[in-house]
Amino acid sequence: MSNTAEHQRLLAHRERRANWRNWGPYLSERAWGTVREDYSPDGEAWTYFPHDHARSRAYRWNEDGLAGISDRNQWLCFALALWNGRDPILKERLFGLTNAEGNHGEDVKEYYFYLDNTPTHSYMQMLYKYPQAAFPYAELVAENARRGLDDFEYELLDTGVFAENRYFDIFVEYAKADENDILIRITAHNRGPEAATLHLLPTLWFRNTWSWGYPRGPMDNTPQRPRLHLVGRSQSVARVRADHPEAGVYWLYAEDADQLLFTENETNRERLFESPNPCPYVKDAFHRYLVEGDLAAVNPENVGTKGAALYSREIGPGKAVQLRLRLAPAELSHPLDGFDPIFARRQEEADAFYAAIHPPELDEEERRIQRQAFAGLLWTKQLYYYDVLQWLQGDPGMPPPPASRWQGRNNGWGHLTNFDVISMPDKWEYPWYATWDLSFHCLPLALIDPDYAKRQLTLMAREWYMHPNGALPAYEWDCDHANPPVHAWAALQVYRIDAQQNGEPDRAFLEGIFHKLLLNFTWWVNRKDADGRNVFQGGFLGLDNISLFDRSTVHPLGGHVDQADGTAWMGFFSLQMMQIALELAQENPVYQDTAVKFFEHFLRIATAMNHLGGRGVSLWDDTDGFYYDALHLPDDSVRPLRVRSLVGLMPLIAVATLEPNLMSRMPTFARRANWFLQHRAQFAQTTACIRAPEGHHCLMALMTEDRLRRVLGYMLDEDEFLSPYGIRSLSKVHQRPYTLDLGGQHFTIAYEPAESRSRLFGGNSNWRGPVWFPLNILLIRALQEYDRYFGDGFTVEYPTGSGRKTTLDVVAGDLARRLISLFLQDDQGHRPIYGGQQIFQEDPHWKDSILFYEYFHGDNGAGLGASHQTGWTGLVAALIQDHR
């Protein structure tokens, strides 16, 4: 481990000598429109708690805010609110469209960028771009409603509110003086040609834990309400004391504030439900005071559970103003002494930390991309609170939920009790964890904070997360959904990265998660193999609309889909578990027995996939040289679904190489594996053989060498899967749509390189052509595994039809560079991710702020889907680390 100040803080946290992670960016960017806040009879979360309610309605489960932070229990929250004098509402949170409002599903309609962050959050920086014209809420909703699935989304830039640079660049920075002592610096730049007024309201409030009817303790039937109050001013610094029964005492110091405003974090029932408010001071008071001019909305006693320092500033063209605040656990006589030197020191320490992380050969551009990818991963941590049994039952102080809830969403997950800081895919569009997304997040996270990465993986397998039957929770919209089983792979990768970073392997971590994953593997085998033939279904498997129809529901004609990808994922899962067992067996030979079990299981899956359980039909199509899903109908007939997609490429990833001479070090494994190969030879006929000469790598793979070459012929063909920016999710050959007629019903699928033209799964993601990072990463690593076995003697034509032959290692490296190039400036200084957005390509105040989109146009690389899905697109940081 390096010896930078940030590394030392991480070490102190690991050794429990300090709690540097107590405060961080754990506030969500959207708490409205979530499953947790939905108490409707129909499960329509977006409409039950819409954006219009968010400013006036107290949240039950968590809080949201702009550029916000909180302690890890979210007792106390801090964020920035803004008003430009023209908006119809106070800007307290990011705005976006719901699933039904967007012509391609939900989408945030704001511009903000995560510029910097460290693992302990000792230094953080975020940029928000705020128009000086009235924010066009209604226009964004109306125009996107008018547009259809064939149209582009209507974005904030399209409205013209940034014309002539009439906007504010607002930088929000945090620097920790100590574990719980946080300096806050807010700098607002007027980029426009004229002076403009900006109202800034740094806001401190308590999460509402007192309104739901729970006693604080067995001897106290009244929950103790926390309290904020103005103590006074000293040397131009306002002092607000925050008392919380659990968090203790904090002080907010605000320099040169015009006013201090106070209210309660309570629902405005009068506005929303036309019922009396228990007290006159409610959650939306600052909006009413500033925007509506209701001076009676705030508490004149300067006390409450929500408070803000109001700064009204006129900023000249090209000028800036800066605010300084401090949130500390102690009363300080001179709270701003040393403010700027502490900030400078923390920035220097952040630079030193990342200098130790970046490979020395990176240029400035690559360092910028990698550092902002890390920043996005760290900024998208969130306190995730969801107690399903409480949610199903309702709270004692509130109306009971509808009876239908007990037969609805997540009713079988009453054990699920989540209250942890978790890596989110995106805190606006996906402000909830997704277990398979999280597995990918952990690879780049392990490069900068391996302890946190290990904790994330372990958390999902805890008994209060994992179902008693062994299932891992998918995501809050439907915990029952089966995501691809990548957890074992991620655990093994993080284990290896951690060992490299810290100089020794953490076998306790690997052994602990392995035992939990044994339960998960058994769940897959027992629940997702409909006919008991080692051919798996799994449903949509995270690939949303990649199929002709929704694979997670019963087919209209009955039966089920035997999935090439579902079966390949189980082969992949088997090999990862086998490799973990062999790693553990280096110190405990008993794990050799378990490794044999997964070796045998892999061979059975491979045989089933290639022979479909001996029924004479295979998921392998020898005429085409590709793997396809098969529709298994009730009359026992099987119809292959000849769609060339990632579904048929996934068998590539079920590959593992074993180190030379491993067999000699694992005699029990070697003996039993050889027995199985000799006495059950039928299970090794269509797979790559494990036997290898002494001193050579052994190979286990679903594909024989011939099938590998045939599938790669498609994958590396620029008229099929190979795009300038990675591997497409659907072959370009389907520019001519593939159609299937069954029982009088017509099904079709076509290559769609950009946004989805289907409403399947809401239409907010598309696997029918774009490039997605996570599966590209797995394909790249698979090619490296094959190359490790075959070496320079195995070459392929790359691209297919070019006449140029190269090794698989070179192909893997080039695919990685194609993915990285999405973010790099080309010869004209343009980044492919920004397509034709000239302001992003040319304006110096925009061009070097990087967005990490959910997926990318299959032909030109333009960013699509969620614009802040740093989660798995943050994998570019790991690619830069490995493939510079």
Image (tube, rainbow, N blue to C red):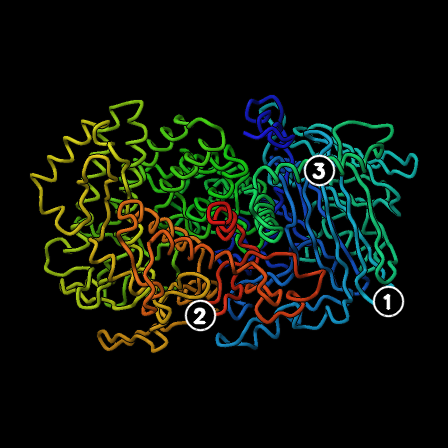
Mark 3: secondary structure: helix
The picture places residue 25, in percent across and down from the top left corner, at 63, 42
Identify the residue at image location x=80%, y=44%.
262
- Which sits earlier in the primary sequence, circle 2 or circle 1? 1
**Amino acid marked by disc 2:** Pro
Disc 2 crowd rating (10 Å Cα; few below 14, some 14-19, many 20+) is many
Question: 516 or 786, which lies in front?
Answer: 786
Q: Which residue is mark 1?
A: 194
Mark 1: secondary structure: loop
Identify the residue at image location x=57%, y=55%.
868
The picture places residue 692, in percent across and down from the top left corner, at 19, 40
Identify the residue at image location x=16%, y=50%.
607
- Which sits earlier in the primary sequence, circle 3 or circle 1? 1
**Can the viewer see residue 832 in this picture?**
yes
**Amino acid marked by disc 1:** Glu
Mark 2: secondary structure: loop
**Amino acid marked by disc 3:** Glu
Q: Seen in the image, is 691 located left or right of residue 829?
A: left
Q: Seen in the image, is 504 located left or right of residue 826?
A: left
**Can the viewer see residue 481 in this picture?**
no
Instruction: Quadrant for residue 353, please give it.
Output: top right
Q: Which residue is mark 2?
A: 753
Question: 823 or 549, which lies in front?
Answer: 823
